[in-house]
Structure formats: structure tokens, C-alpha cells
Image (cartoon, rainbow, N blue to C red):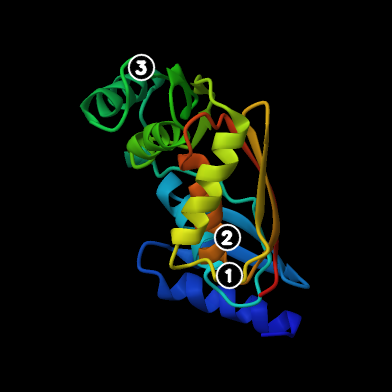
Amino acid sequence: MGKTKDIRAAVEAELRFDPLIDPADIAVRNIDGDVALNGTVPSYPQYLEAAAAAQRVGGVKNVHNHLEVVLPDEDFRDDAMLTTAANNALTLNVTVPDGVEATARDGNLTLTGTVGYGKERAAAELAVSGLIGLRNVRNDIEISYNADPVDIDLHVQEALDRSALVPGDSDVQAVTKGGTVTLTGHVRTWAEHDAVVDAAWMARGVIDVSDNLQLTG
């Protein structure tokens, strides 16, 4: 997968292979493992899935998702209808705390409110991501929790040590300042990368994660 044309062809093949994606209007560009997805897809879940599919391909170091969601006429929802559907989805989801709200404008949802954990913030976004009529999601939910940065570093490192996806000789380090965890080091795959980032977000007191990990492929 070292050659540029091979990575691009592999990403295109993965997009065709994934049953959740219609790749007809997706163009793939690659420069030394930096992959850009351009074009259109008919739904927000396909927008997300296309990036995930590209990340599964060996040799891909970064994915720049420039896809635009162009809804078919039958999937259009006015803002009032989409806002109601989104807030119902948030209310009915047991993993989303009370107080999180959604507002739609031109098919774009904005999530607001305050939660105690990064995983709750992500859960809110996931709860609305499959709604008909959705073009994009802006997650402005705040995370509010006080914790000792030393404890955060320790808990993240312990989580990495437990992970089956992170090798024992990993050089990944997590340093916390002001509630922000900065991740540095090298990972071999996107699965390992995501395992490290997810571990950081799960720690109590984390309000942001700065991802400086390098993918070696």
C-alpha cells in the first residue's frame, strides 16, 4: 500500500464494499497517505461512514472529509420538525443526561447543554446522527467537572495499559493541563488511534483532548 495510486484504489474499493455507503458521487484523492473525500452523499450517516471506511484502509494516515450531504427531496424536514425529532431522540436516550438540547437551522443541528463526561457528549451526538433530514451536527455541549490533572493522567495511562489494542511497548503519553489531555506518541492503526483517544475521553474531568498522535501505518 506504499504507492499513492494503490491507497486511493483501496479506499475506493472499501467505499464500494461498505453496504452503508453509496459511493457514486464520492471522489478520492491521496497524497502520501493523506486522503481527501470530495463530492456528495445523500445522508449524514453516509458522511460519517465514508470517513470511517477510509480509515480502515492500510496506509491511510489522515482523512479529510469534504463531503457534502445533499438530501433527496423525500428526506427533507423543516427546522421545526427536525428540532422536535432531535430533542425527542435526546430525551429517549438513557445515556444522554437531562439538559442537553438541539436546535436545527437549514438541516444543521446544534447541540447545547452541560454534561459531566466526554462520553456523554459523544452519546448525545450519536443519538441524533441517524435522523432523517439531518445535514450536519455541531456539538457545543460543555463538559463541567473538577478533577486533579495527576489523577487524570494516571487513569488514562491505566486505561491504555488495559487496552487490547494498545501494545505493551507503546510510546503514547497523556499529559493533562487545565482539563485538556494532550496525546503524543505513535500508533500503528486507526483502531489503535481511536482506542487511545477514547480512553482519554472516558477519564473523569477531561473537557478536551488534543490529538497529536502520529500514525505509522
Q: Nearer the viewer, mark 2 or mark 3?
A: 2
Q: Nearer the viewer, mark 1 or mark 3?
A: 1
What percent of the width, then of the height, locates residue 150? 61, 35
Q: CA distance from mark 1 to mark 3?
A: 41 Å
Residue where numbered disc 3 is placed: 80
Decide: few, some or many residues near mark 2? Use Cα within 10 Å; few <14, some 14-19, many ≥20. Answer: some
Q: Are marks 2 and 1 in contact (CB under 8 Å)?
A: yes
Residue where numbered disc 1 is placed: 189
Which corner quadrant holds the N terminus? bottom right
Vertical order, 136 against 56 (above or below): above
What percent of the width, then of the height, locates residue 169? 62, 71
Dot 3 lies on which element? helix
In screen coordinates, is 194 left or right of 45?
Answer: right
What percent of the width, then of the height, locates residue 135? 48, 37
Going by the numbered disc 2, the residue's amino acid type is His
| In the foreground, 155 or 102 | 155
Going by the numbered disc 3, the residue's amino acid type is Ala
Vertical order, 38 against 147 (above or below): below
Dot 2 lies on which element? helix
* Residue ID at (48%, 67%): 165
Q: Earlier in the sequence, mark 1 or mark 3?
A: 3
**Number of marks in the image?**
3
Decide: few, some or many residues near mark 1? Use Cα within 10 Å; few <14, some 14-19, many ≥20. Answer: many
Q: Earlier in the sequence, mark 2 or mark 3?
A: 3
| In the foreground, 167 or 99 | 167
Residue where numbered disc 2 is placed: 193
**Snapshot quadrant of residue 154:** top right
| In the foreground, 177 or 101 | 177
**Snapshot quadrant of residue 187:** bottom right
In screen coordinates, is 46 left or right of 55?
Answer: left
